[in-house]
Amino acid sequence: MRICAVIPAAGQGERLGLEVPKIFAPLDETCTAWSVLRDAVMPQVEHAAVVLAPPAVPLFENVLAADVARFRISVAVQEKATGMGDAIFAAWPIWRDFESILVVWGDQVNLSTDTLARTLEAHRQSEAGCTIPLIETADPYVQYVFNGAGRLVHIRQAREHDTVDATGYSDVGIFALHSRGLKDLWQIYRATCAAGSGTQEINFLPFLVFLADRGWPLHIVRAGCADEARGINTASDLAFARERFARRNSARASAYGMREE
């Protein structure tokens, strides 16, 4: 199965106090959001499409020029910030000939390579539908709601002013979907869906409920830990990611020192 990663990354980073697009948010002296995603995703897929706002394109292409994998990475442009769904399908000319797509939010820097690999392994064993890693978290930013039969019936989003439970199942910003007929279904959904009450954007997550209503199988993989569900949406999220990377680097440095001895 040939898989194209699709990374919507049109966020500009102003809310985080950044002077660069959010995908270039620095996490430590050497890592940015993009470098983390690139290193996690590219070994798992045949190609990647990164979806950017127009101002970010020259900066990204400059970074890409030195990348040994640059011939497997393409750029798509989202001219207007109308939502993640439109961003994904802005890259359709790039991914349309692949059997599946792997959607990874462009700020999902806490993802684990283990969760990513297990998600794709499960997806490759499926013949249709979508595969999503979920994890139970406290005060979820996004909450998946299932009925008694285990079918997905709603996805609550705090940013759209939905009420979420004290604990609930959340995604970790990774979604694997078979691509056959997907664009046609998006166009049907896009013609009738409502914009989010908070963002006024056409969200991608309710599209998953739309697919479930039409009989698309949903394959659930358990994510590794709750930290993976945390993207970079606020300044505190960015501080959390930086602290997490600092701890990781410290642990690696200590392990390396022990080996040297």
Image: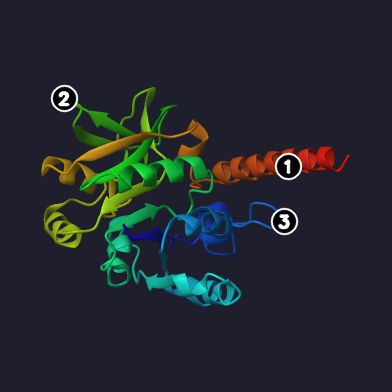
What is the crowding at mark 3: few (fewer than 14 residues within 10 Å), some, or many (at least 20)?
Answer: few
Of the numbered discs 3 and 1, the one sitting upstream in the chain is 3
Where residue 252 sits in the image (x, y, percent)? 73, 42
In the rendered image, the vertical position of residue 91 relative to residue 1, given as above or below: below
In the rendered image, which residue does mark 2 sit on? 149
In the rendered image, which residue does mark 3 sit on? 29
Judging from the image, what secondary structure is the residue with disc 3 in? loop
Cα distance between the residues tagged 2 and 1: 45 Å
In the rendered image, the vertical position of residue 7 relative to residue 230, given as above or below: below
Q: Is residue 36 visible?
A: yes
Cα distance between the residues tagged 3 and 1: 15 Å
Q: Look at label 2 and name its amino acid.
A: Ala
Nearer the observer, disc 2 or disc 1? 1
The disc placed on residue 252 is 1
For image coordinates 42% across by 52% down, the residue present is 105
Q: Look at label 3 and name its amino acid.
A: Glu
